[in-house]
Amino acid sequence: MSSFLTLKVLPEVDDCLKLRVRGSSCGFSGQADCYVNESEFLTFSKSLQGFPKKMDQVLTFDSGKSDSISNFELSFSCANSSGHVKLEVEITHIESFVNLKTNRCSSTFSLVVMPSDIDTFQSNLISVANSSNVDQMAELRSET
């Protein structure tokens, strides 16, 4: 079974960075269109270079927890002494309608990947971290 995470740049009129975050692992999946702070996301993307540098290193990014807009959180950590990387993902899709109850759907799952996969993913994230790169995508896959 293939597990994956993709982040794709969506068009946005306010020059904001809008990403479609989609992923799946072990039968759990989620998708949400989320706004992120472009400069914070770029800083995070750059910090993934050469990850992990030490066994207890953890890198986390979240788009901002909210009860009113969709959001996501990514947490990278070293999975073992072989350097495998564990990525924990939480995707929350929030849909609001006037005069109706807000729908909130959330999915949490994890992937374990090789450090070389993180290097490729990281270089693609740099391109995704630019709101003018519409349709640019970064993908991380794990065969489980």
Image: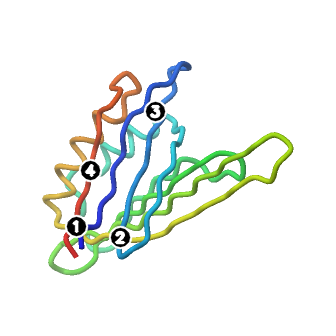
Q: Position of residue 18 (x, y in %)?
A: 48, 34
Q: Residue at x 43, y 71 (%)?
A: 28
**Residue 139: image tag:** 4
Amino acid carrying mark 2 in the image:
Ser
List the residue tagged with mark 1: 142
Q: Circle 1 sits in a helix, a strand or a loop, which is it? A: strand
**Residue 38: image tag:** 3
Q: Earlier in the sequence, mark 3 or mark 2?
A: 2
Q: Position of residue 65 (x, y in %)?
A: 63, 53
Q: Rounded to the nearest whole Å, what is the CA distance between mark 1 and mark 4?
A: 10 Å
Q: Circle 3 sits in a helix, a strand or a loop, which is it? A: helix
Q: Label 4: few (<14), some or many (≥20) within 10 Å?
A: some
Amino acid carrying mark 4 in the image:
Glu
**Residue 25: image tag:** 2
Amino acid carrying mark 1 in the image:
Ser
Q: Rounded to the nearest whole Å, what is the CA distance between mark 1 and mark 2?
A: 9 Å
Whether the residues at callouts 1 and 2 have beta carbons within 8 Å, the answer is: yes
Q: Earlier in the sequence, mark 2 or mark 4?
A: 2
Amino acid carrying mark 3 in the image:
Glu
Whether the residues at callouts 3 and 4 have beta carbons within 8 Å, the answer is: no
Locate residue 76: give its quadrant. Answer: bottom left
Whether the residues at callouts 2 and 4 have beta carbons within 8 Å, the answer is: no
